[in-house]
Amino acid sequence: MTQREKWGTKLGIIMAVAGSAVGLGNFLRFPVQAAQNGGGAFMIPYFISFLLLGIPLMWIEWAIGRHGGLFGHGSAPFIFTRLSKNRLMKYLGVIGIFGPLVIFVYYTYIESWLLGYAFFALTGKLLSLTTAESMKGFLSAYQGLAPQSNVWTAYVFFLITFAINFLVIFKGIKGGIEKLCNIAMPLLFAFAVIIAIRVLTLGPSILDGLGFLWNPNFAVLADAKVWMAAAGQIFFTLSVGIGAILTYASYLSHGDDIVLSGATAASTNEFAEVILGGSIVIPAAFAFLGVAGAQAAAASGSFNLGFVTMPFIFGQIPFGQIFSFLWFSLLFLAGITSSVSLMEPAVAFVRDEFNLDRKTAVKRLLVITFILCQFPIFFLGQGVVDELDFWGGTFCLVLFATIEVVLFVWVFGMDRAWEEMHRGAELNIPRFYKFIMKYVTPLFLFFILGFWFIQQAWPTILMKGVSDAGKPYVIATRIGLVLLFLGIAYFVRKAWYYKKSLGEVE
């Protein structure tokens, strides 16, 4: 068995997990969700979901990962076999490699747009566009979706972004990921605070902008969709159910405190989302575009908010070129600290279960993921990214979180799970969380899974809303995803028999 890596410091693991969680959703998705779902009233189901779903899942994933690391495993398939003697469990764990890998394939390309836009903001090219329509046209041309445009400019920035990601991953846990997050996270927060202060000092109208976002409309609390939106936002913002936190936690020592570290990482993420994310986009849109403009901006989705509305607004204020550069830089930093975490479950699997050194494992995965990344780049306009996001970033996320909770709390056992979570802990988890983790969290997850399947998944599976021209690409993407899943399952099976021949598994 190869020697597994360890985190350098307690701060390093907190920054890394917070970096995995703090992403584009904190600054773009959250304010849109809040504005569209009752403003301040949205925070009631949001914080209830945080307490009943987010925090329990965070502690559970930290505990499962640390427990697996004790046996030399850093990915879900073999960690699951340490929680249950049923050997079929390793195939459920395939989701914990498949999901983050699928997200990485398209997320890295979107992340590269942020690097490109930061460059264009710094050179002044972006703010030379003076209307929202010209901003939209620039984005379409950059993506290769406009007539007579191509993706090669975007492709150059993709190559740079892809190389940075793999350089960090190649350097390892302590020398790569931890070092990146220790630098990127403070910079990210500094940039966000600077932009938030500038937005909040735009003038008296900014108070109305904050009111637009935070004034509660309590009538919406009777709508189940609002509660679903809040629970979904907690999933996305904490990066639970993906598999990355589980892998990160596997690099802990068995006596490391996960109660305080998990709570600290979650709190850091919430500060970035609620305080900073809620103080920038929607208030700025309200101050410059008015009520109708802010509503239109929120309705346009997080994508247009980030790449069209915000640079347009920055173009209207002094030193807008600098603020636009800081905006896209903070989003890029949020993106890259998340994307490196998405690759780590696959790296840990290849390295741990085939007894390879990190450099060899990373080189092999580099080739595979580079090939896979070409599909969302060149077929963006055919709905490939939406399809990858649905299966990797939504379906697998909710399903994997449900499997984790049931396996750890009900199969491994609540008493053993409670003891595992408190091993080395300086603080005790409030005892009522034992009841919440055993009954409330899994029921909450089953409710989300069922409601979401009826409301969103079934129409998507049936390709409702997909044009006839786009259906062949959607079907081809689904076939590719099935083959990828089966391929990972094959290597899990191969690794199992390899480990069995060495006497490392029963």
Image: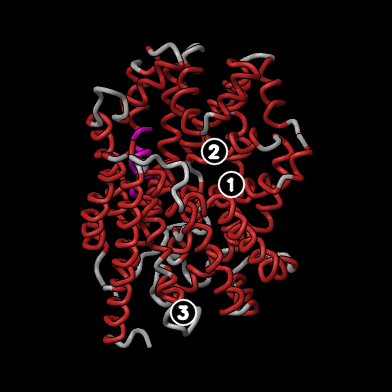
Rendered residue at 41%/19% (across/down): 135
Q: Secondary structure at mark 1?
A: helix
**Amino acid marked by disc 1:** Gln
Q: Is residue 190 magenta?
A: no
The residue where tag 3 is placed is 82
Residue 29: assigned label: 2
Q: Is residue 109 magenta?
A: yes
Label 2 neighbourhood size at 10 Å, few (<14), some (14-19), many (20+)?
many
| Secondary structure that dominates the magenta span | helix
Q: Which residues are magenta?
A: 105-114
> In which quadrant of the rendered image does the C terminus lie?
bottom left
Quarter of the image where one finds residue 500? bottom left
Mark 2 vs mark 1, CA separation in Å: 8 Å
Mark 1 vs mark 3, CA separation in Å: 30 Å
Whether tag 3 and tag 2 are in contact, CB under 8 A, the answer is no
Disc tally is 3
Label 1 neighbourhood size at 10 Å, few (<14), some (14-19), many (20+)?
many
Rendered residue at 72%/26% (across/down): 211
Image position of 18 with respect to 315: above or below:
below
Whether tag 2 and tag 1 are in contact, CB under 8 A, the answer is yes
The residue where tag 1 is placed is 233
